[in-house]
Amino acid sequence: MKFVAFERAKQGTGASRRLRITGRTPGIVYGGTGEATLIELDHNALWHAIKKEAFHASILEMELGGKSQKVLLRDLQMHPFKQQILHIDFQRVEAKTRLTMKVPLHYSGEEESPAVKTEQCLANHVLTELTISCFPADVPEFIPVDLSGLTKGASLHVKDITLPKGVKFVAKGQDNPVLVSVTAIVEEVEAAPAADVAATAAPADSKDAKATAKPAAKAPAKAPAKPAAKK
């Protein structure tokens, strides 16, 4: 994938703000044998480019000052609520230097698997990308994963798939993480509405209440008042 960049002389917050006002995005290219280079890109062209998966997970060809060089996207800073790219970083790529990067996983065959087609299960995609290490010439745009063999109660791990030639998985805390897990669909039985249950139980409850109810005790009658003594 190709794109065009231009060198910029000024740096700093003020210079970057003025660039953005004119429809440009500030950036930098570093790594390799050369020094870090300040660049600027057309924001509209860059905005359309970042929507493509290849821009994030493949070696890019950048034209700068009439010369072409291979780079890799390393960082992208977005505005918190505007559709605006604030800054972008690229790393130069050398043919004999191994790269460590994230590559998306493309799942297929899920609908044809026994787990989904006949066993009424769901296939949960636990990971959507893998961190890999390889030489620039071996960088895959994506890693295909076939799910047609999934069965009920099973799960798919990194070691269960075949990585492209020259590509190694970079473990970060887990040597064999789960890519896809299979769970059975549980059908919930609807309970009877509480109002109906109460209505059904009401007559029986009322009869029992009458049968067990005790008559209220009568208050003792007051003794007649004695006549007042005559003087």
Image (tube, rainbow, N blue to C red):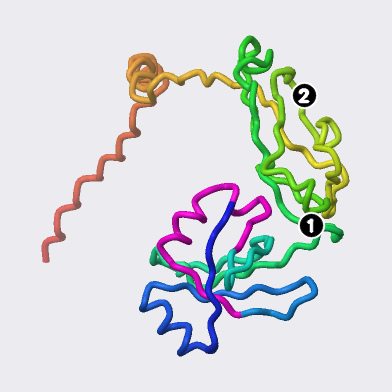
- Magenta residue span: 38-62
Could you say which is closer to the camera, residue 121 or residue 188?
Answer: 121
Q: Residue furthest top?
A: 118
Q: How far from the left and from the top, in percent, is residue 120? A: 61, 15
Could you tell me which residue is drawn at 64 percent across and 79 percent down? 37
Amino acid type of the residue tagged 2 in the rendering: Ala
Question: In which quarter of the view is residue 178 placed?
Answer: top right
Q: Nearer the viewer, mark 2 or mark 1?
A: 1
Could you say which is closer to the camera, residue 42 or residue 56?
Answer: 42
Which mark is on residue 100? 1
Could you tell me which residue is drawn at 40 percent across and 66 percent down? 81
- Nearer-N-terminus badge (2/1): 1
Could you tell me which residue is drawn at 53 percent across and 74 percent down? 6
Q: Secondary structure at mark 2?
A: loop
Q: CA distance from mark 2 to mark 1?
A: 30 Å
Amino acid type of the residue tagged 1 in the rendering: Thr
**In this figure, which residue is indicated by the disc labeled 2?**
154
Could you say which is closer to the camera, residue 64 or residue 60?
Answer: 64
Q: Secondary structure at mark 1?
A: strand
Q: Residues within 10 Å of mark 1 (few under 14, many from 20)?
A: some
